[in-house]
Each structure stands twice: as structure tokens, then as C-alpha cells.
Image (cartoon, helix red, strand yellow):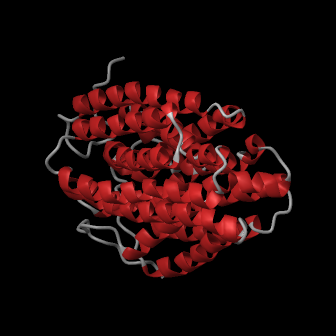
Amino acid sequence: MKSPTLPVSLSRPPLALSVASFVSSFDRFAVSPMLVLIAADLGVSLSASVGAASGYYLAYGLTQPLWGLLSDRFGRVRVMRWALFGAAVAGAASALMPVLATLVVARVVTGACFGAVIPTGLTYVGDTVQPSVRQRALTDLMAAAALGTALATGLGGVVAGLVDWRVAFTVPAACALACAVSLRSLPEPPREESALRGGTGVRRYLGAVLGQRWALLVFGLAFTEGAIMLGAMPFLATALQHTGLAAAVAGLAITAYGLGLWAFSKLVKQLSGRWPAPLLMVVGGTQLCLGFAIVAVHVSVPAVAVTALLLGGGWSFLHSSLQTWATSIVPEARGTTIAFFACALFVGSAVASWAAGPLAEHGRYGLLFGLAAGAAIPLTAVAALTRRRYGALPADLPADRPDPLPE
């Protein structure tokens, strides 16, 4: 039986969608404070154990175009449910893997499946919420993900340190199964397909998105943001553990990120209707730069906690502005657009975390975080200036509109 369709009238994401985003975020961030313990338990180096995180992020990112195309073709809710069932199976398998190689494979599959949830949820919001209040609804979804991040970074280290790191993979797997069942009652939103021209099926969506140079620009910004933010942030916990702190303490210090993300997302929700997007981006980028600059100078529990708090604010202001922009560029293929956006974000994070592994292995955290702080400056400048140029255009643009970007 076909699910009923929704009018474009929602003002906030459905509860089931928020819970699924919470679980996806929890699973993604739980591994960070466990990398040292995984390395010790499996008898491998820290730089090798980073593969469990970078492989997850890489799969999470590279599968985004596939999930986006599938959601545009078969529906948002159906794709999220398929993915959550897959994440439940792969997540449970992760907890049983006896060696690093099989653990990395299991985490890659888990990341690929969980990768469908938040981007497709963002697309769902884009389909069902008017552009004038869309950033507020997106920040509600971000707040749910932030709570998952806060609990993952805090409880992940505690559970791994006091019980076993495998338990931290089992919990989100069970929750993913519950979410897949609960999403069954969520109706499918209508999708705008009439404006797409040329080709059939997948080719129409790819042509509409990849033919938009504004979209390509936003994807490039997302890649850079992912490399800076998500690529460097997992090493905050390992930097503390490098000083001799237990995984539980290191994880609790990073909890400030999730708390900051939750609190600042509420502030962004209030400011989004009054402050222009470029200003929100500048505020967010400044927080990213300051946060990484602090730990580039000195690593301690207070310094990491302040940095994590600032990174939560930076993500709330900068990332929510970028993802709101992404939902407006090609509304006729919104699922594909958001999928490529998320792909760029997490491929950037995977590349950066892989490249930073040797620096962490040798304890060169000052250089690692200093590079992240410096890279945040051009990212912020380019994002704010280009978003200002785009700002004079209507919120939702047809895909065949002449592109004002220079040749």
C-alpha cells in the first residue's frame, strides 16, 4: 500500500526522524574516544586503528550519491528504513570482529548504511518545510544529532573504559533496528520532478545537480569543512589520552562538543530569521578557528573542553547555513543534491583523518590542530562571500536557470 503524501506545511521534523538522526550521530562519534583502547586490545598501532574511523567516514561519504539517487527514485522513508536495517546488522557484526581488518570491514558497511539517515532526513525536511523557516527546522534536526554526539563522546569512552569497547557498537545497532520499525508509519513527502529535463531516471537527477555550478561550489565548501572539522576533531580525545588520561575522562571532555552543538543550534534557530546567512557563516568559521587554535597551543582537559564547545558552535552556525543553502539549489533533485553535499563532507573528513594519523601517532598534535585552525580562515571567507553573492536570488531556484557564477 502506498504511503500518504504530506503537504509542504511542517514547521519541525517528525519525532521518528529526529530519533533516527540521534542514533546515526551516536554511532558515528562513539568510536573517537575508543581508538586507543581498540589499538591496545587488538594489538595494533594507533595510526592503524584510525582505519576503523576513517573507513567508516569514507564509506559514509562515498555512498551518499547512491542514497540520494535512491531516495529521489523510491522515496525518502523507504530508503531510510532499508539503510537502518542494514546498519543494525553491520553494527552488531562490528562488536564480534576479532581482528582489525574484519572490524574495519564491518565499520565500513555500518558507515555506508548509517550514511543514508541524516542526509535523507535533511532532504525530508527540505521537502516538507517552507524555505522561510527551513533553517529553523534543520537546526531542530541538528539538535537531535547533537544530543547523540554528546552522549556518544561521553558514554562511548566511559563504556569502553569501564566495560568493553564492543558494547558501544552493540547499542546503536539495536537502536537502528528499532528506528527502522518505527519509521514505517512516517508518510512519504511529495517530490518536485516536473522541472527536470533530459534523460531518464538517474541521468535526470545527476544532470540537474552536476550541471549546477552553484551546487559544485557548495560541495567544495562541504569537502573543506569536513576535512577541517570532522577530520581533526576525533583527535581531540586521542590527544588527551596521549597525555596519560583514561579514555573515559577524554570522552567526557569531548562531550562539550555535543552540548555546545545543542545549545548553539537553539541560538541559530532564533537568529536565522534575523541575521543573513553570510554573517552566520562568519560567526561559525571564527569559532572553528579559535577552537583549534586553543588546542594547537596547549592540550589539557579544560582546553579541549573549551575547544569542543567552540567547535559545536562553529558547526551550528557554519554547517547549518551551508546545508540550508544546499537544500535550495536544485529542489527538483533535492535528495541527490544533499547526498552529494554529504558525500563531499565525509570524504573530506576521511581524507583528513587518514592524513592526520601519522601526526597523531608521533604526538604532533600542535601541528595537526594548527593546520585545522589556519584552514578555517579561507573556508569562512569563501563561504561567506559566495553565499552573499547568491543571497539576492530566490530561495528555491529552477535547475535550468542561467547560472550567474563566472566562467
| In-image side of 324 versus 39 (left or right) | left
Identify the residue at image location x=75%, y=56%: 38
Query: Which residue is rendered at x = 63% and y = 77% of the image?
Result: 174
Q: Which of these two is toward me, 106 or 40?
A: 40
Q: Is residue 308 left or right of residue 326?
A: right
What is the number of callouts on the image?
Answer: 0
Q: Judge whether 15 appears above or below 99 on screen.
A: below
- In the displayed structure, 370 sits above or below 147; it is above
> Can residue 86 be seen in the rendering of this structure?
no
Question: Where is residue 224 drawn, in percent x and y?
Answer: 48, 33
Residue 230 seen in the figure: yes
Residue with the most extreme top position: 407
Which residue in the rendered view is the most extreme toward the left?
A: 274
Which corner quadrant holds the C terminus? top left
Q: Is residue 373 above or below residue 244?
A: above
> In the displayed structure, does residue 147 sit left or right of residue 107?
left
Q: x, y percentage for residue 139?
A: 32, 58
- Residue name at image x 27 percent, y 62 percent: 129
Which residue is located at x 51 percent, y 49 percent? 301
Which residue is nearer to you in this view: 136 or 328?
136
* Along the viewing direction, whichever of 111 and 103 lies nearer the viewer: 103
Question: Where does residue 311 sit, x and y in percent of width and height?
Answer: 41, 45
Residue 240 placed where, x, y %?
60, 47
Res 243 quadrant in image: top right
Above or below, comparing residue 104 to residue 346 in the picture = below
